[in-house]
């Protein structure tokens, strides 16, 4: 080692190779181990010692790889994708369930869960005009006792107007 080196660990090729390639640590994780304040010093040391730098994607977790690569391109589908949530997602605060064979499915293959709960309760499909109202106004609360069927959007808006008037009256008291 050259005379006057302040940080001998930063010049130890075997140690840096072990930490970076064999253990798979990131530069920011190696820096405190070898006594550096900044990952850029570790990167410069790797290059100076002839240790190849990983491509950014080689150190990605499966979740990050799916988010940025294969999943985005459609090469990983459903259960293979670490982002898969079993066919349930949130759309504008509502739970949506993957149900591509449903007659009233949205373009992406999902149906709002509150509509499915109401259809099961009634034993029939809802028409496109029918609207399901959440009594407590919590969009994700899909218990049948919290749901109310409205014949159309106008009836649904009347319910909201009545509730708003009652809330305003109670606030005024």
Image (cartoon, rainbow, N blue to C red):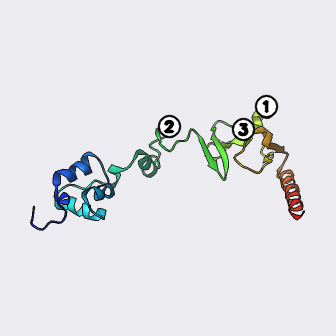
In percent of width and height, residue 17 lies at 21, 51
Q: CA distance from mark 2 to mark 1?
A: 31 Å
Which of the image's four quarters has the C terminus? bottom right
**Residue on which disc 3 sits:** 116
Occupied quadrant, residue 166: bottom right
Mark 3 lies on a secondary structure that is: helix
Occupied quadrant, residue 28: bottom left
Q: CA distance from mark 2 to mark 3?
A: 23 Å
Which one is earlier in the sequence, the residue at label 2 or at label 3? 2
Residue sitting at the far top: 123
**Residue on which disc 2 sits:** 79
Q: Name the disc covering residue 123, or none.
A: 1
The residue that appears at 67% across and 51% down in the rendered structure is 93
* Image position of 148 with respect to 45: above or below: above
| Left or right relative to 147: residue 56 | left
Label 3: how many Cα within 10 Å (few below 14, some 14–19, many 20+) = some
Q: Name the disc covering residue 87, or none.
A: none
The residue that appears at 16% across and 54% down in the rendered structure is 13
Residue sitting at the far bottom: 4
């Amino acid at each position: 080692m050259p005379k006057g080196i302040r940080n001998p660990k930063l010049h130890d090729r075997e140690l840096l190779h072990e930490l970076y390639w064999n253990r798979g640590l990131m530069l920011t994780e190696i820096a405190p181990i070898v006594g550096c304040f900044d990952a850029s010093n570790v990167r410069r040391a790797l290059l100076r010692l002839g240790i190849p730098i990983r491509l950014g994607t080689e150190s990605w977790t499966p979740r990050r790889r799916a988010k940025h690569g294969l999943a985005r391109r459609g090469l990983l589908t459903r259960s293979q994708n670490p982002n898969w949530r079993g066919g349930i997602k949130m759309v504008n605060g509502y739970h949506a369930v993957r149900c591509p064979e449903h007659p009233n499915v949205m373009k992406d293959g999902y149906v709002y869960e509150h509509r499915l709960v109401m259809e099961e309760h009634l034993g029939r499909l809802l028409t496109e005009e029918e609207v399901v109202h959440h009594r407590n106004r919590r969009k994700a609360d899909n218990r049948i006792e919290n749901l109310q069927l409205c014949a159309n959007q106008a009836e649904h808006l009347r319910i909201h107007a009545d509730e708003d008037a009652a809330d305003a009256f109670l606030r005024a008291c």
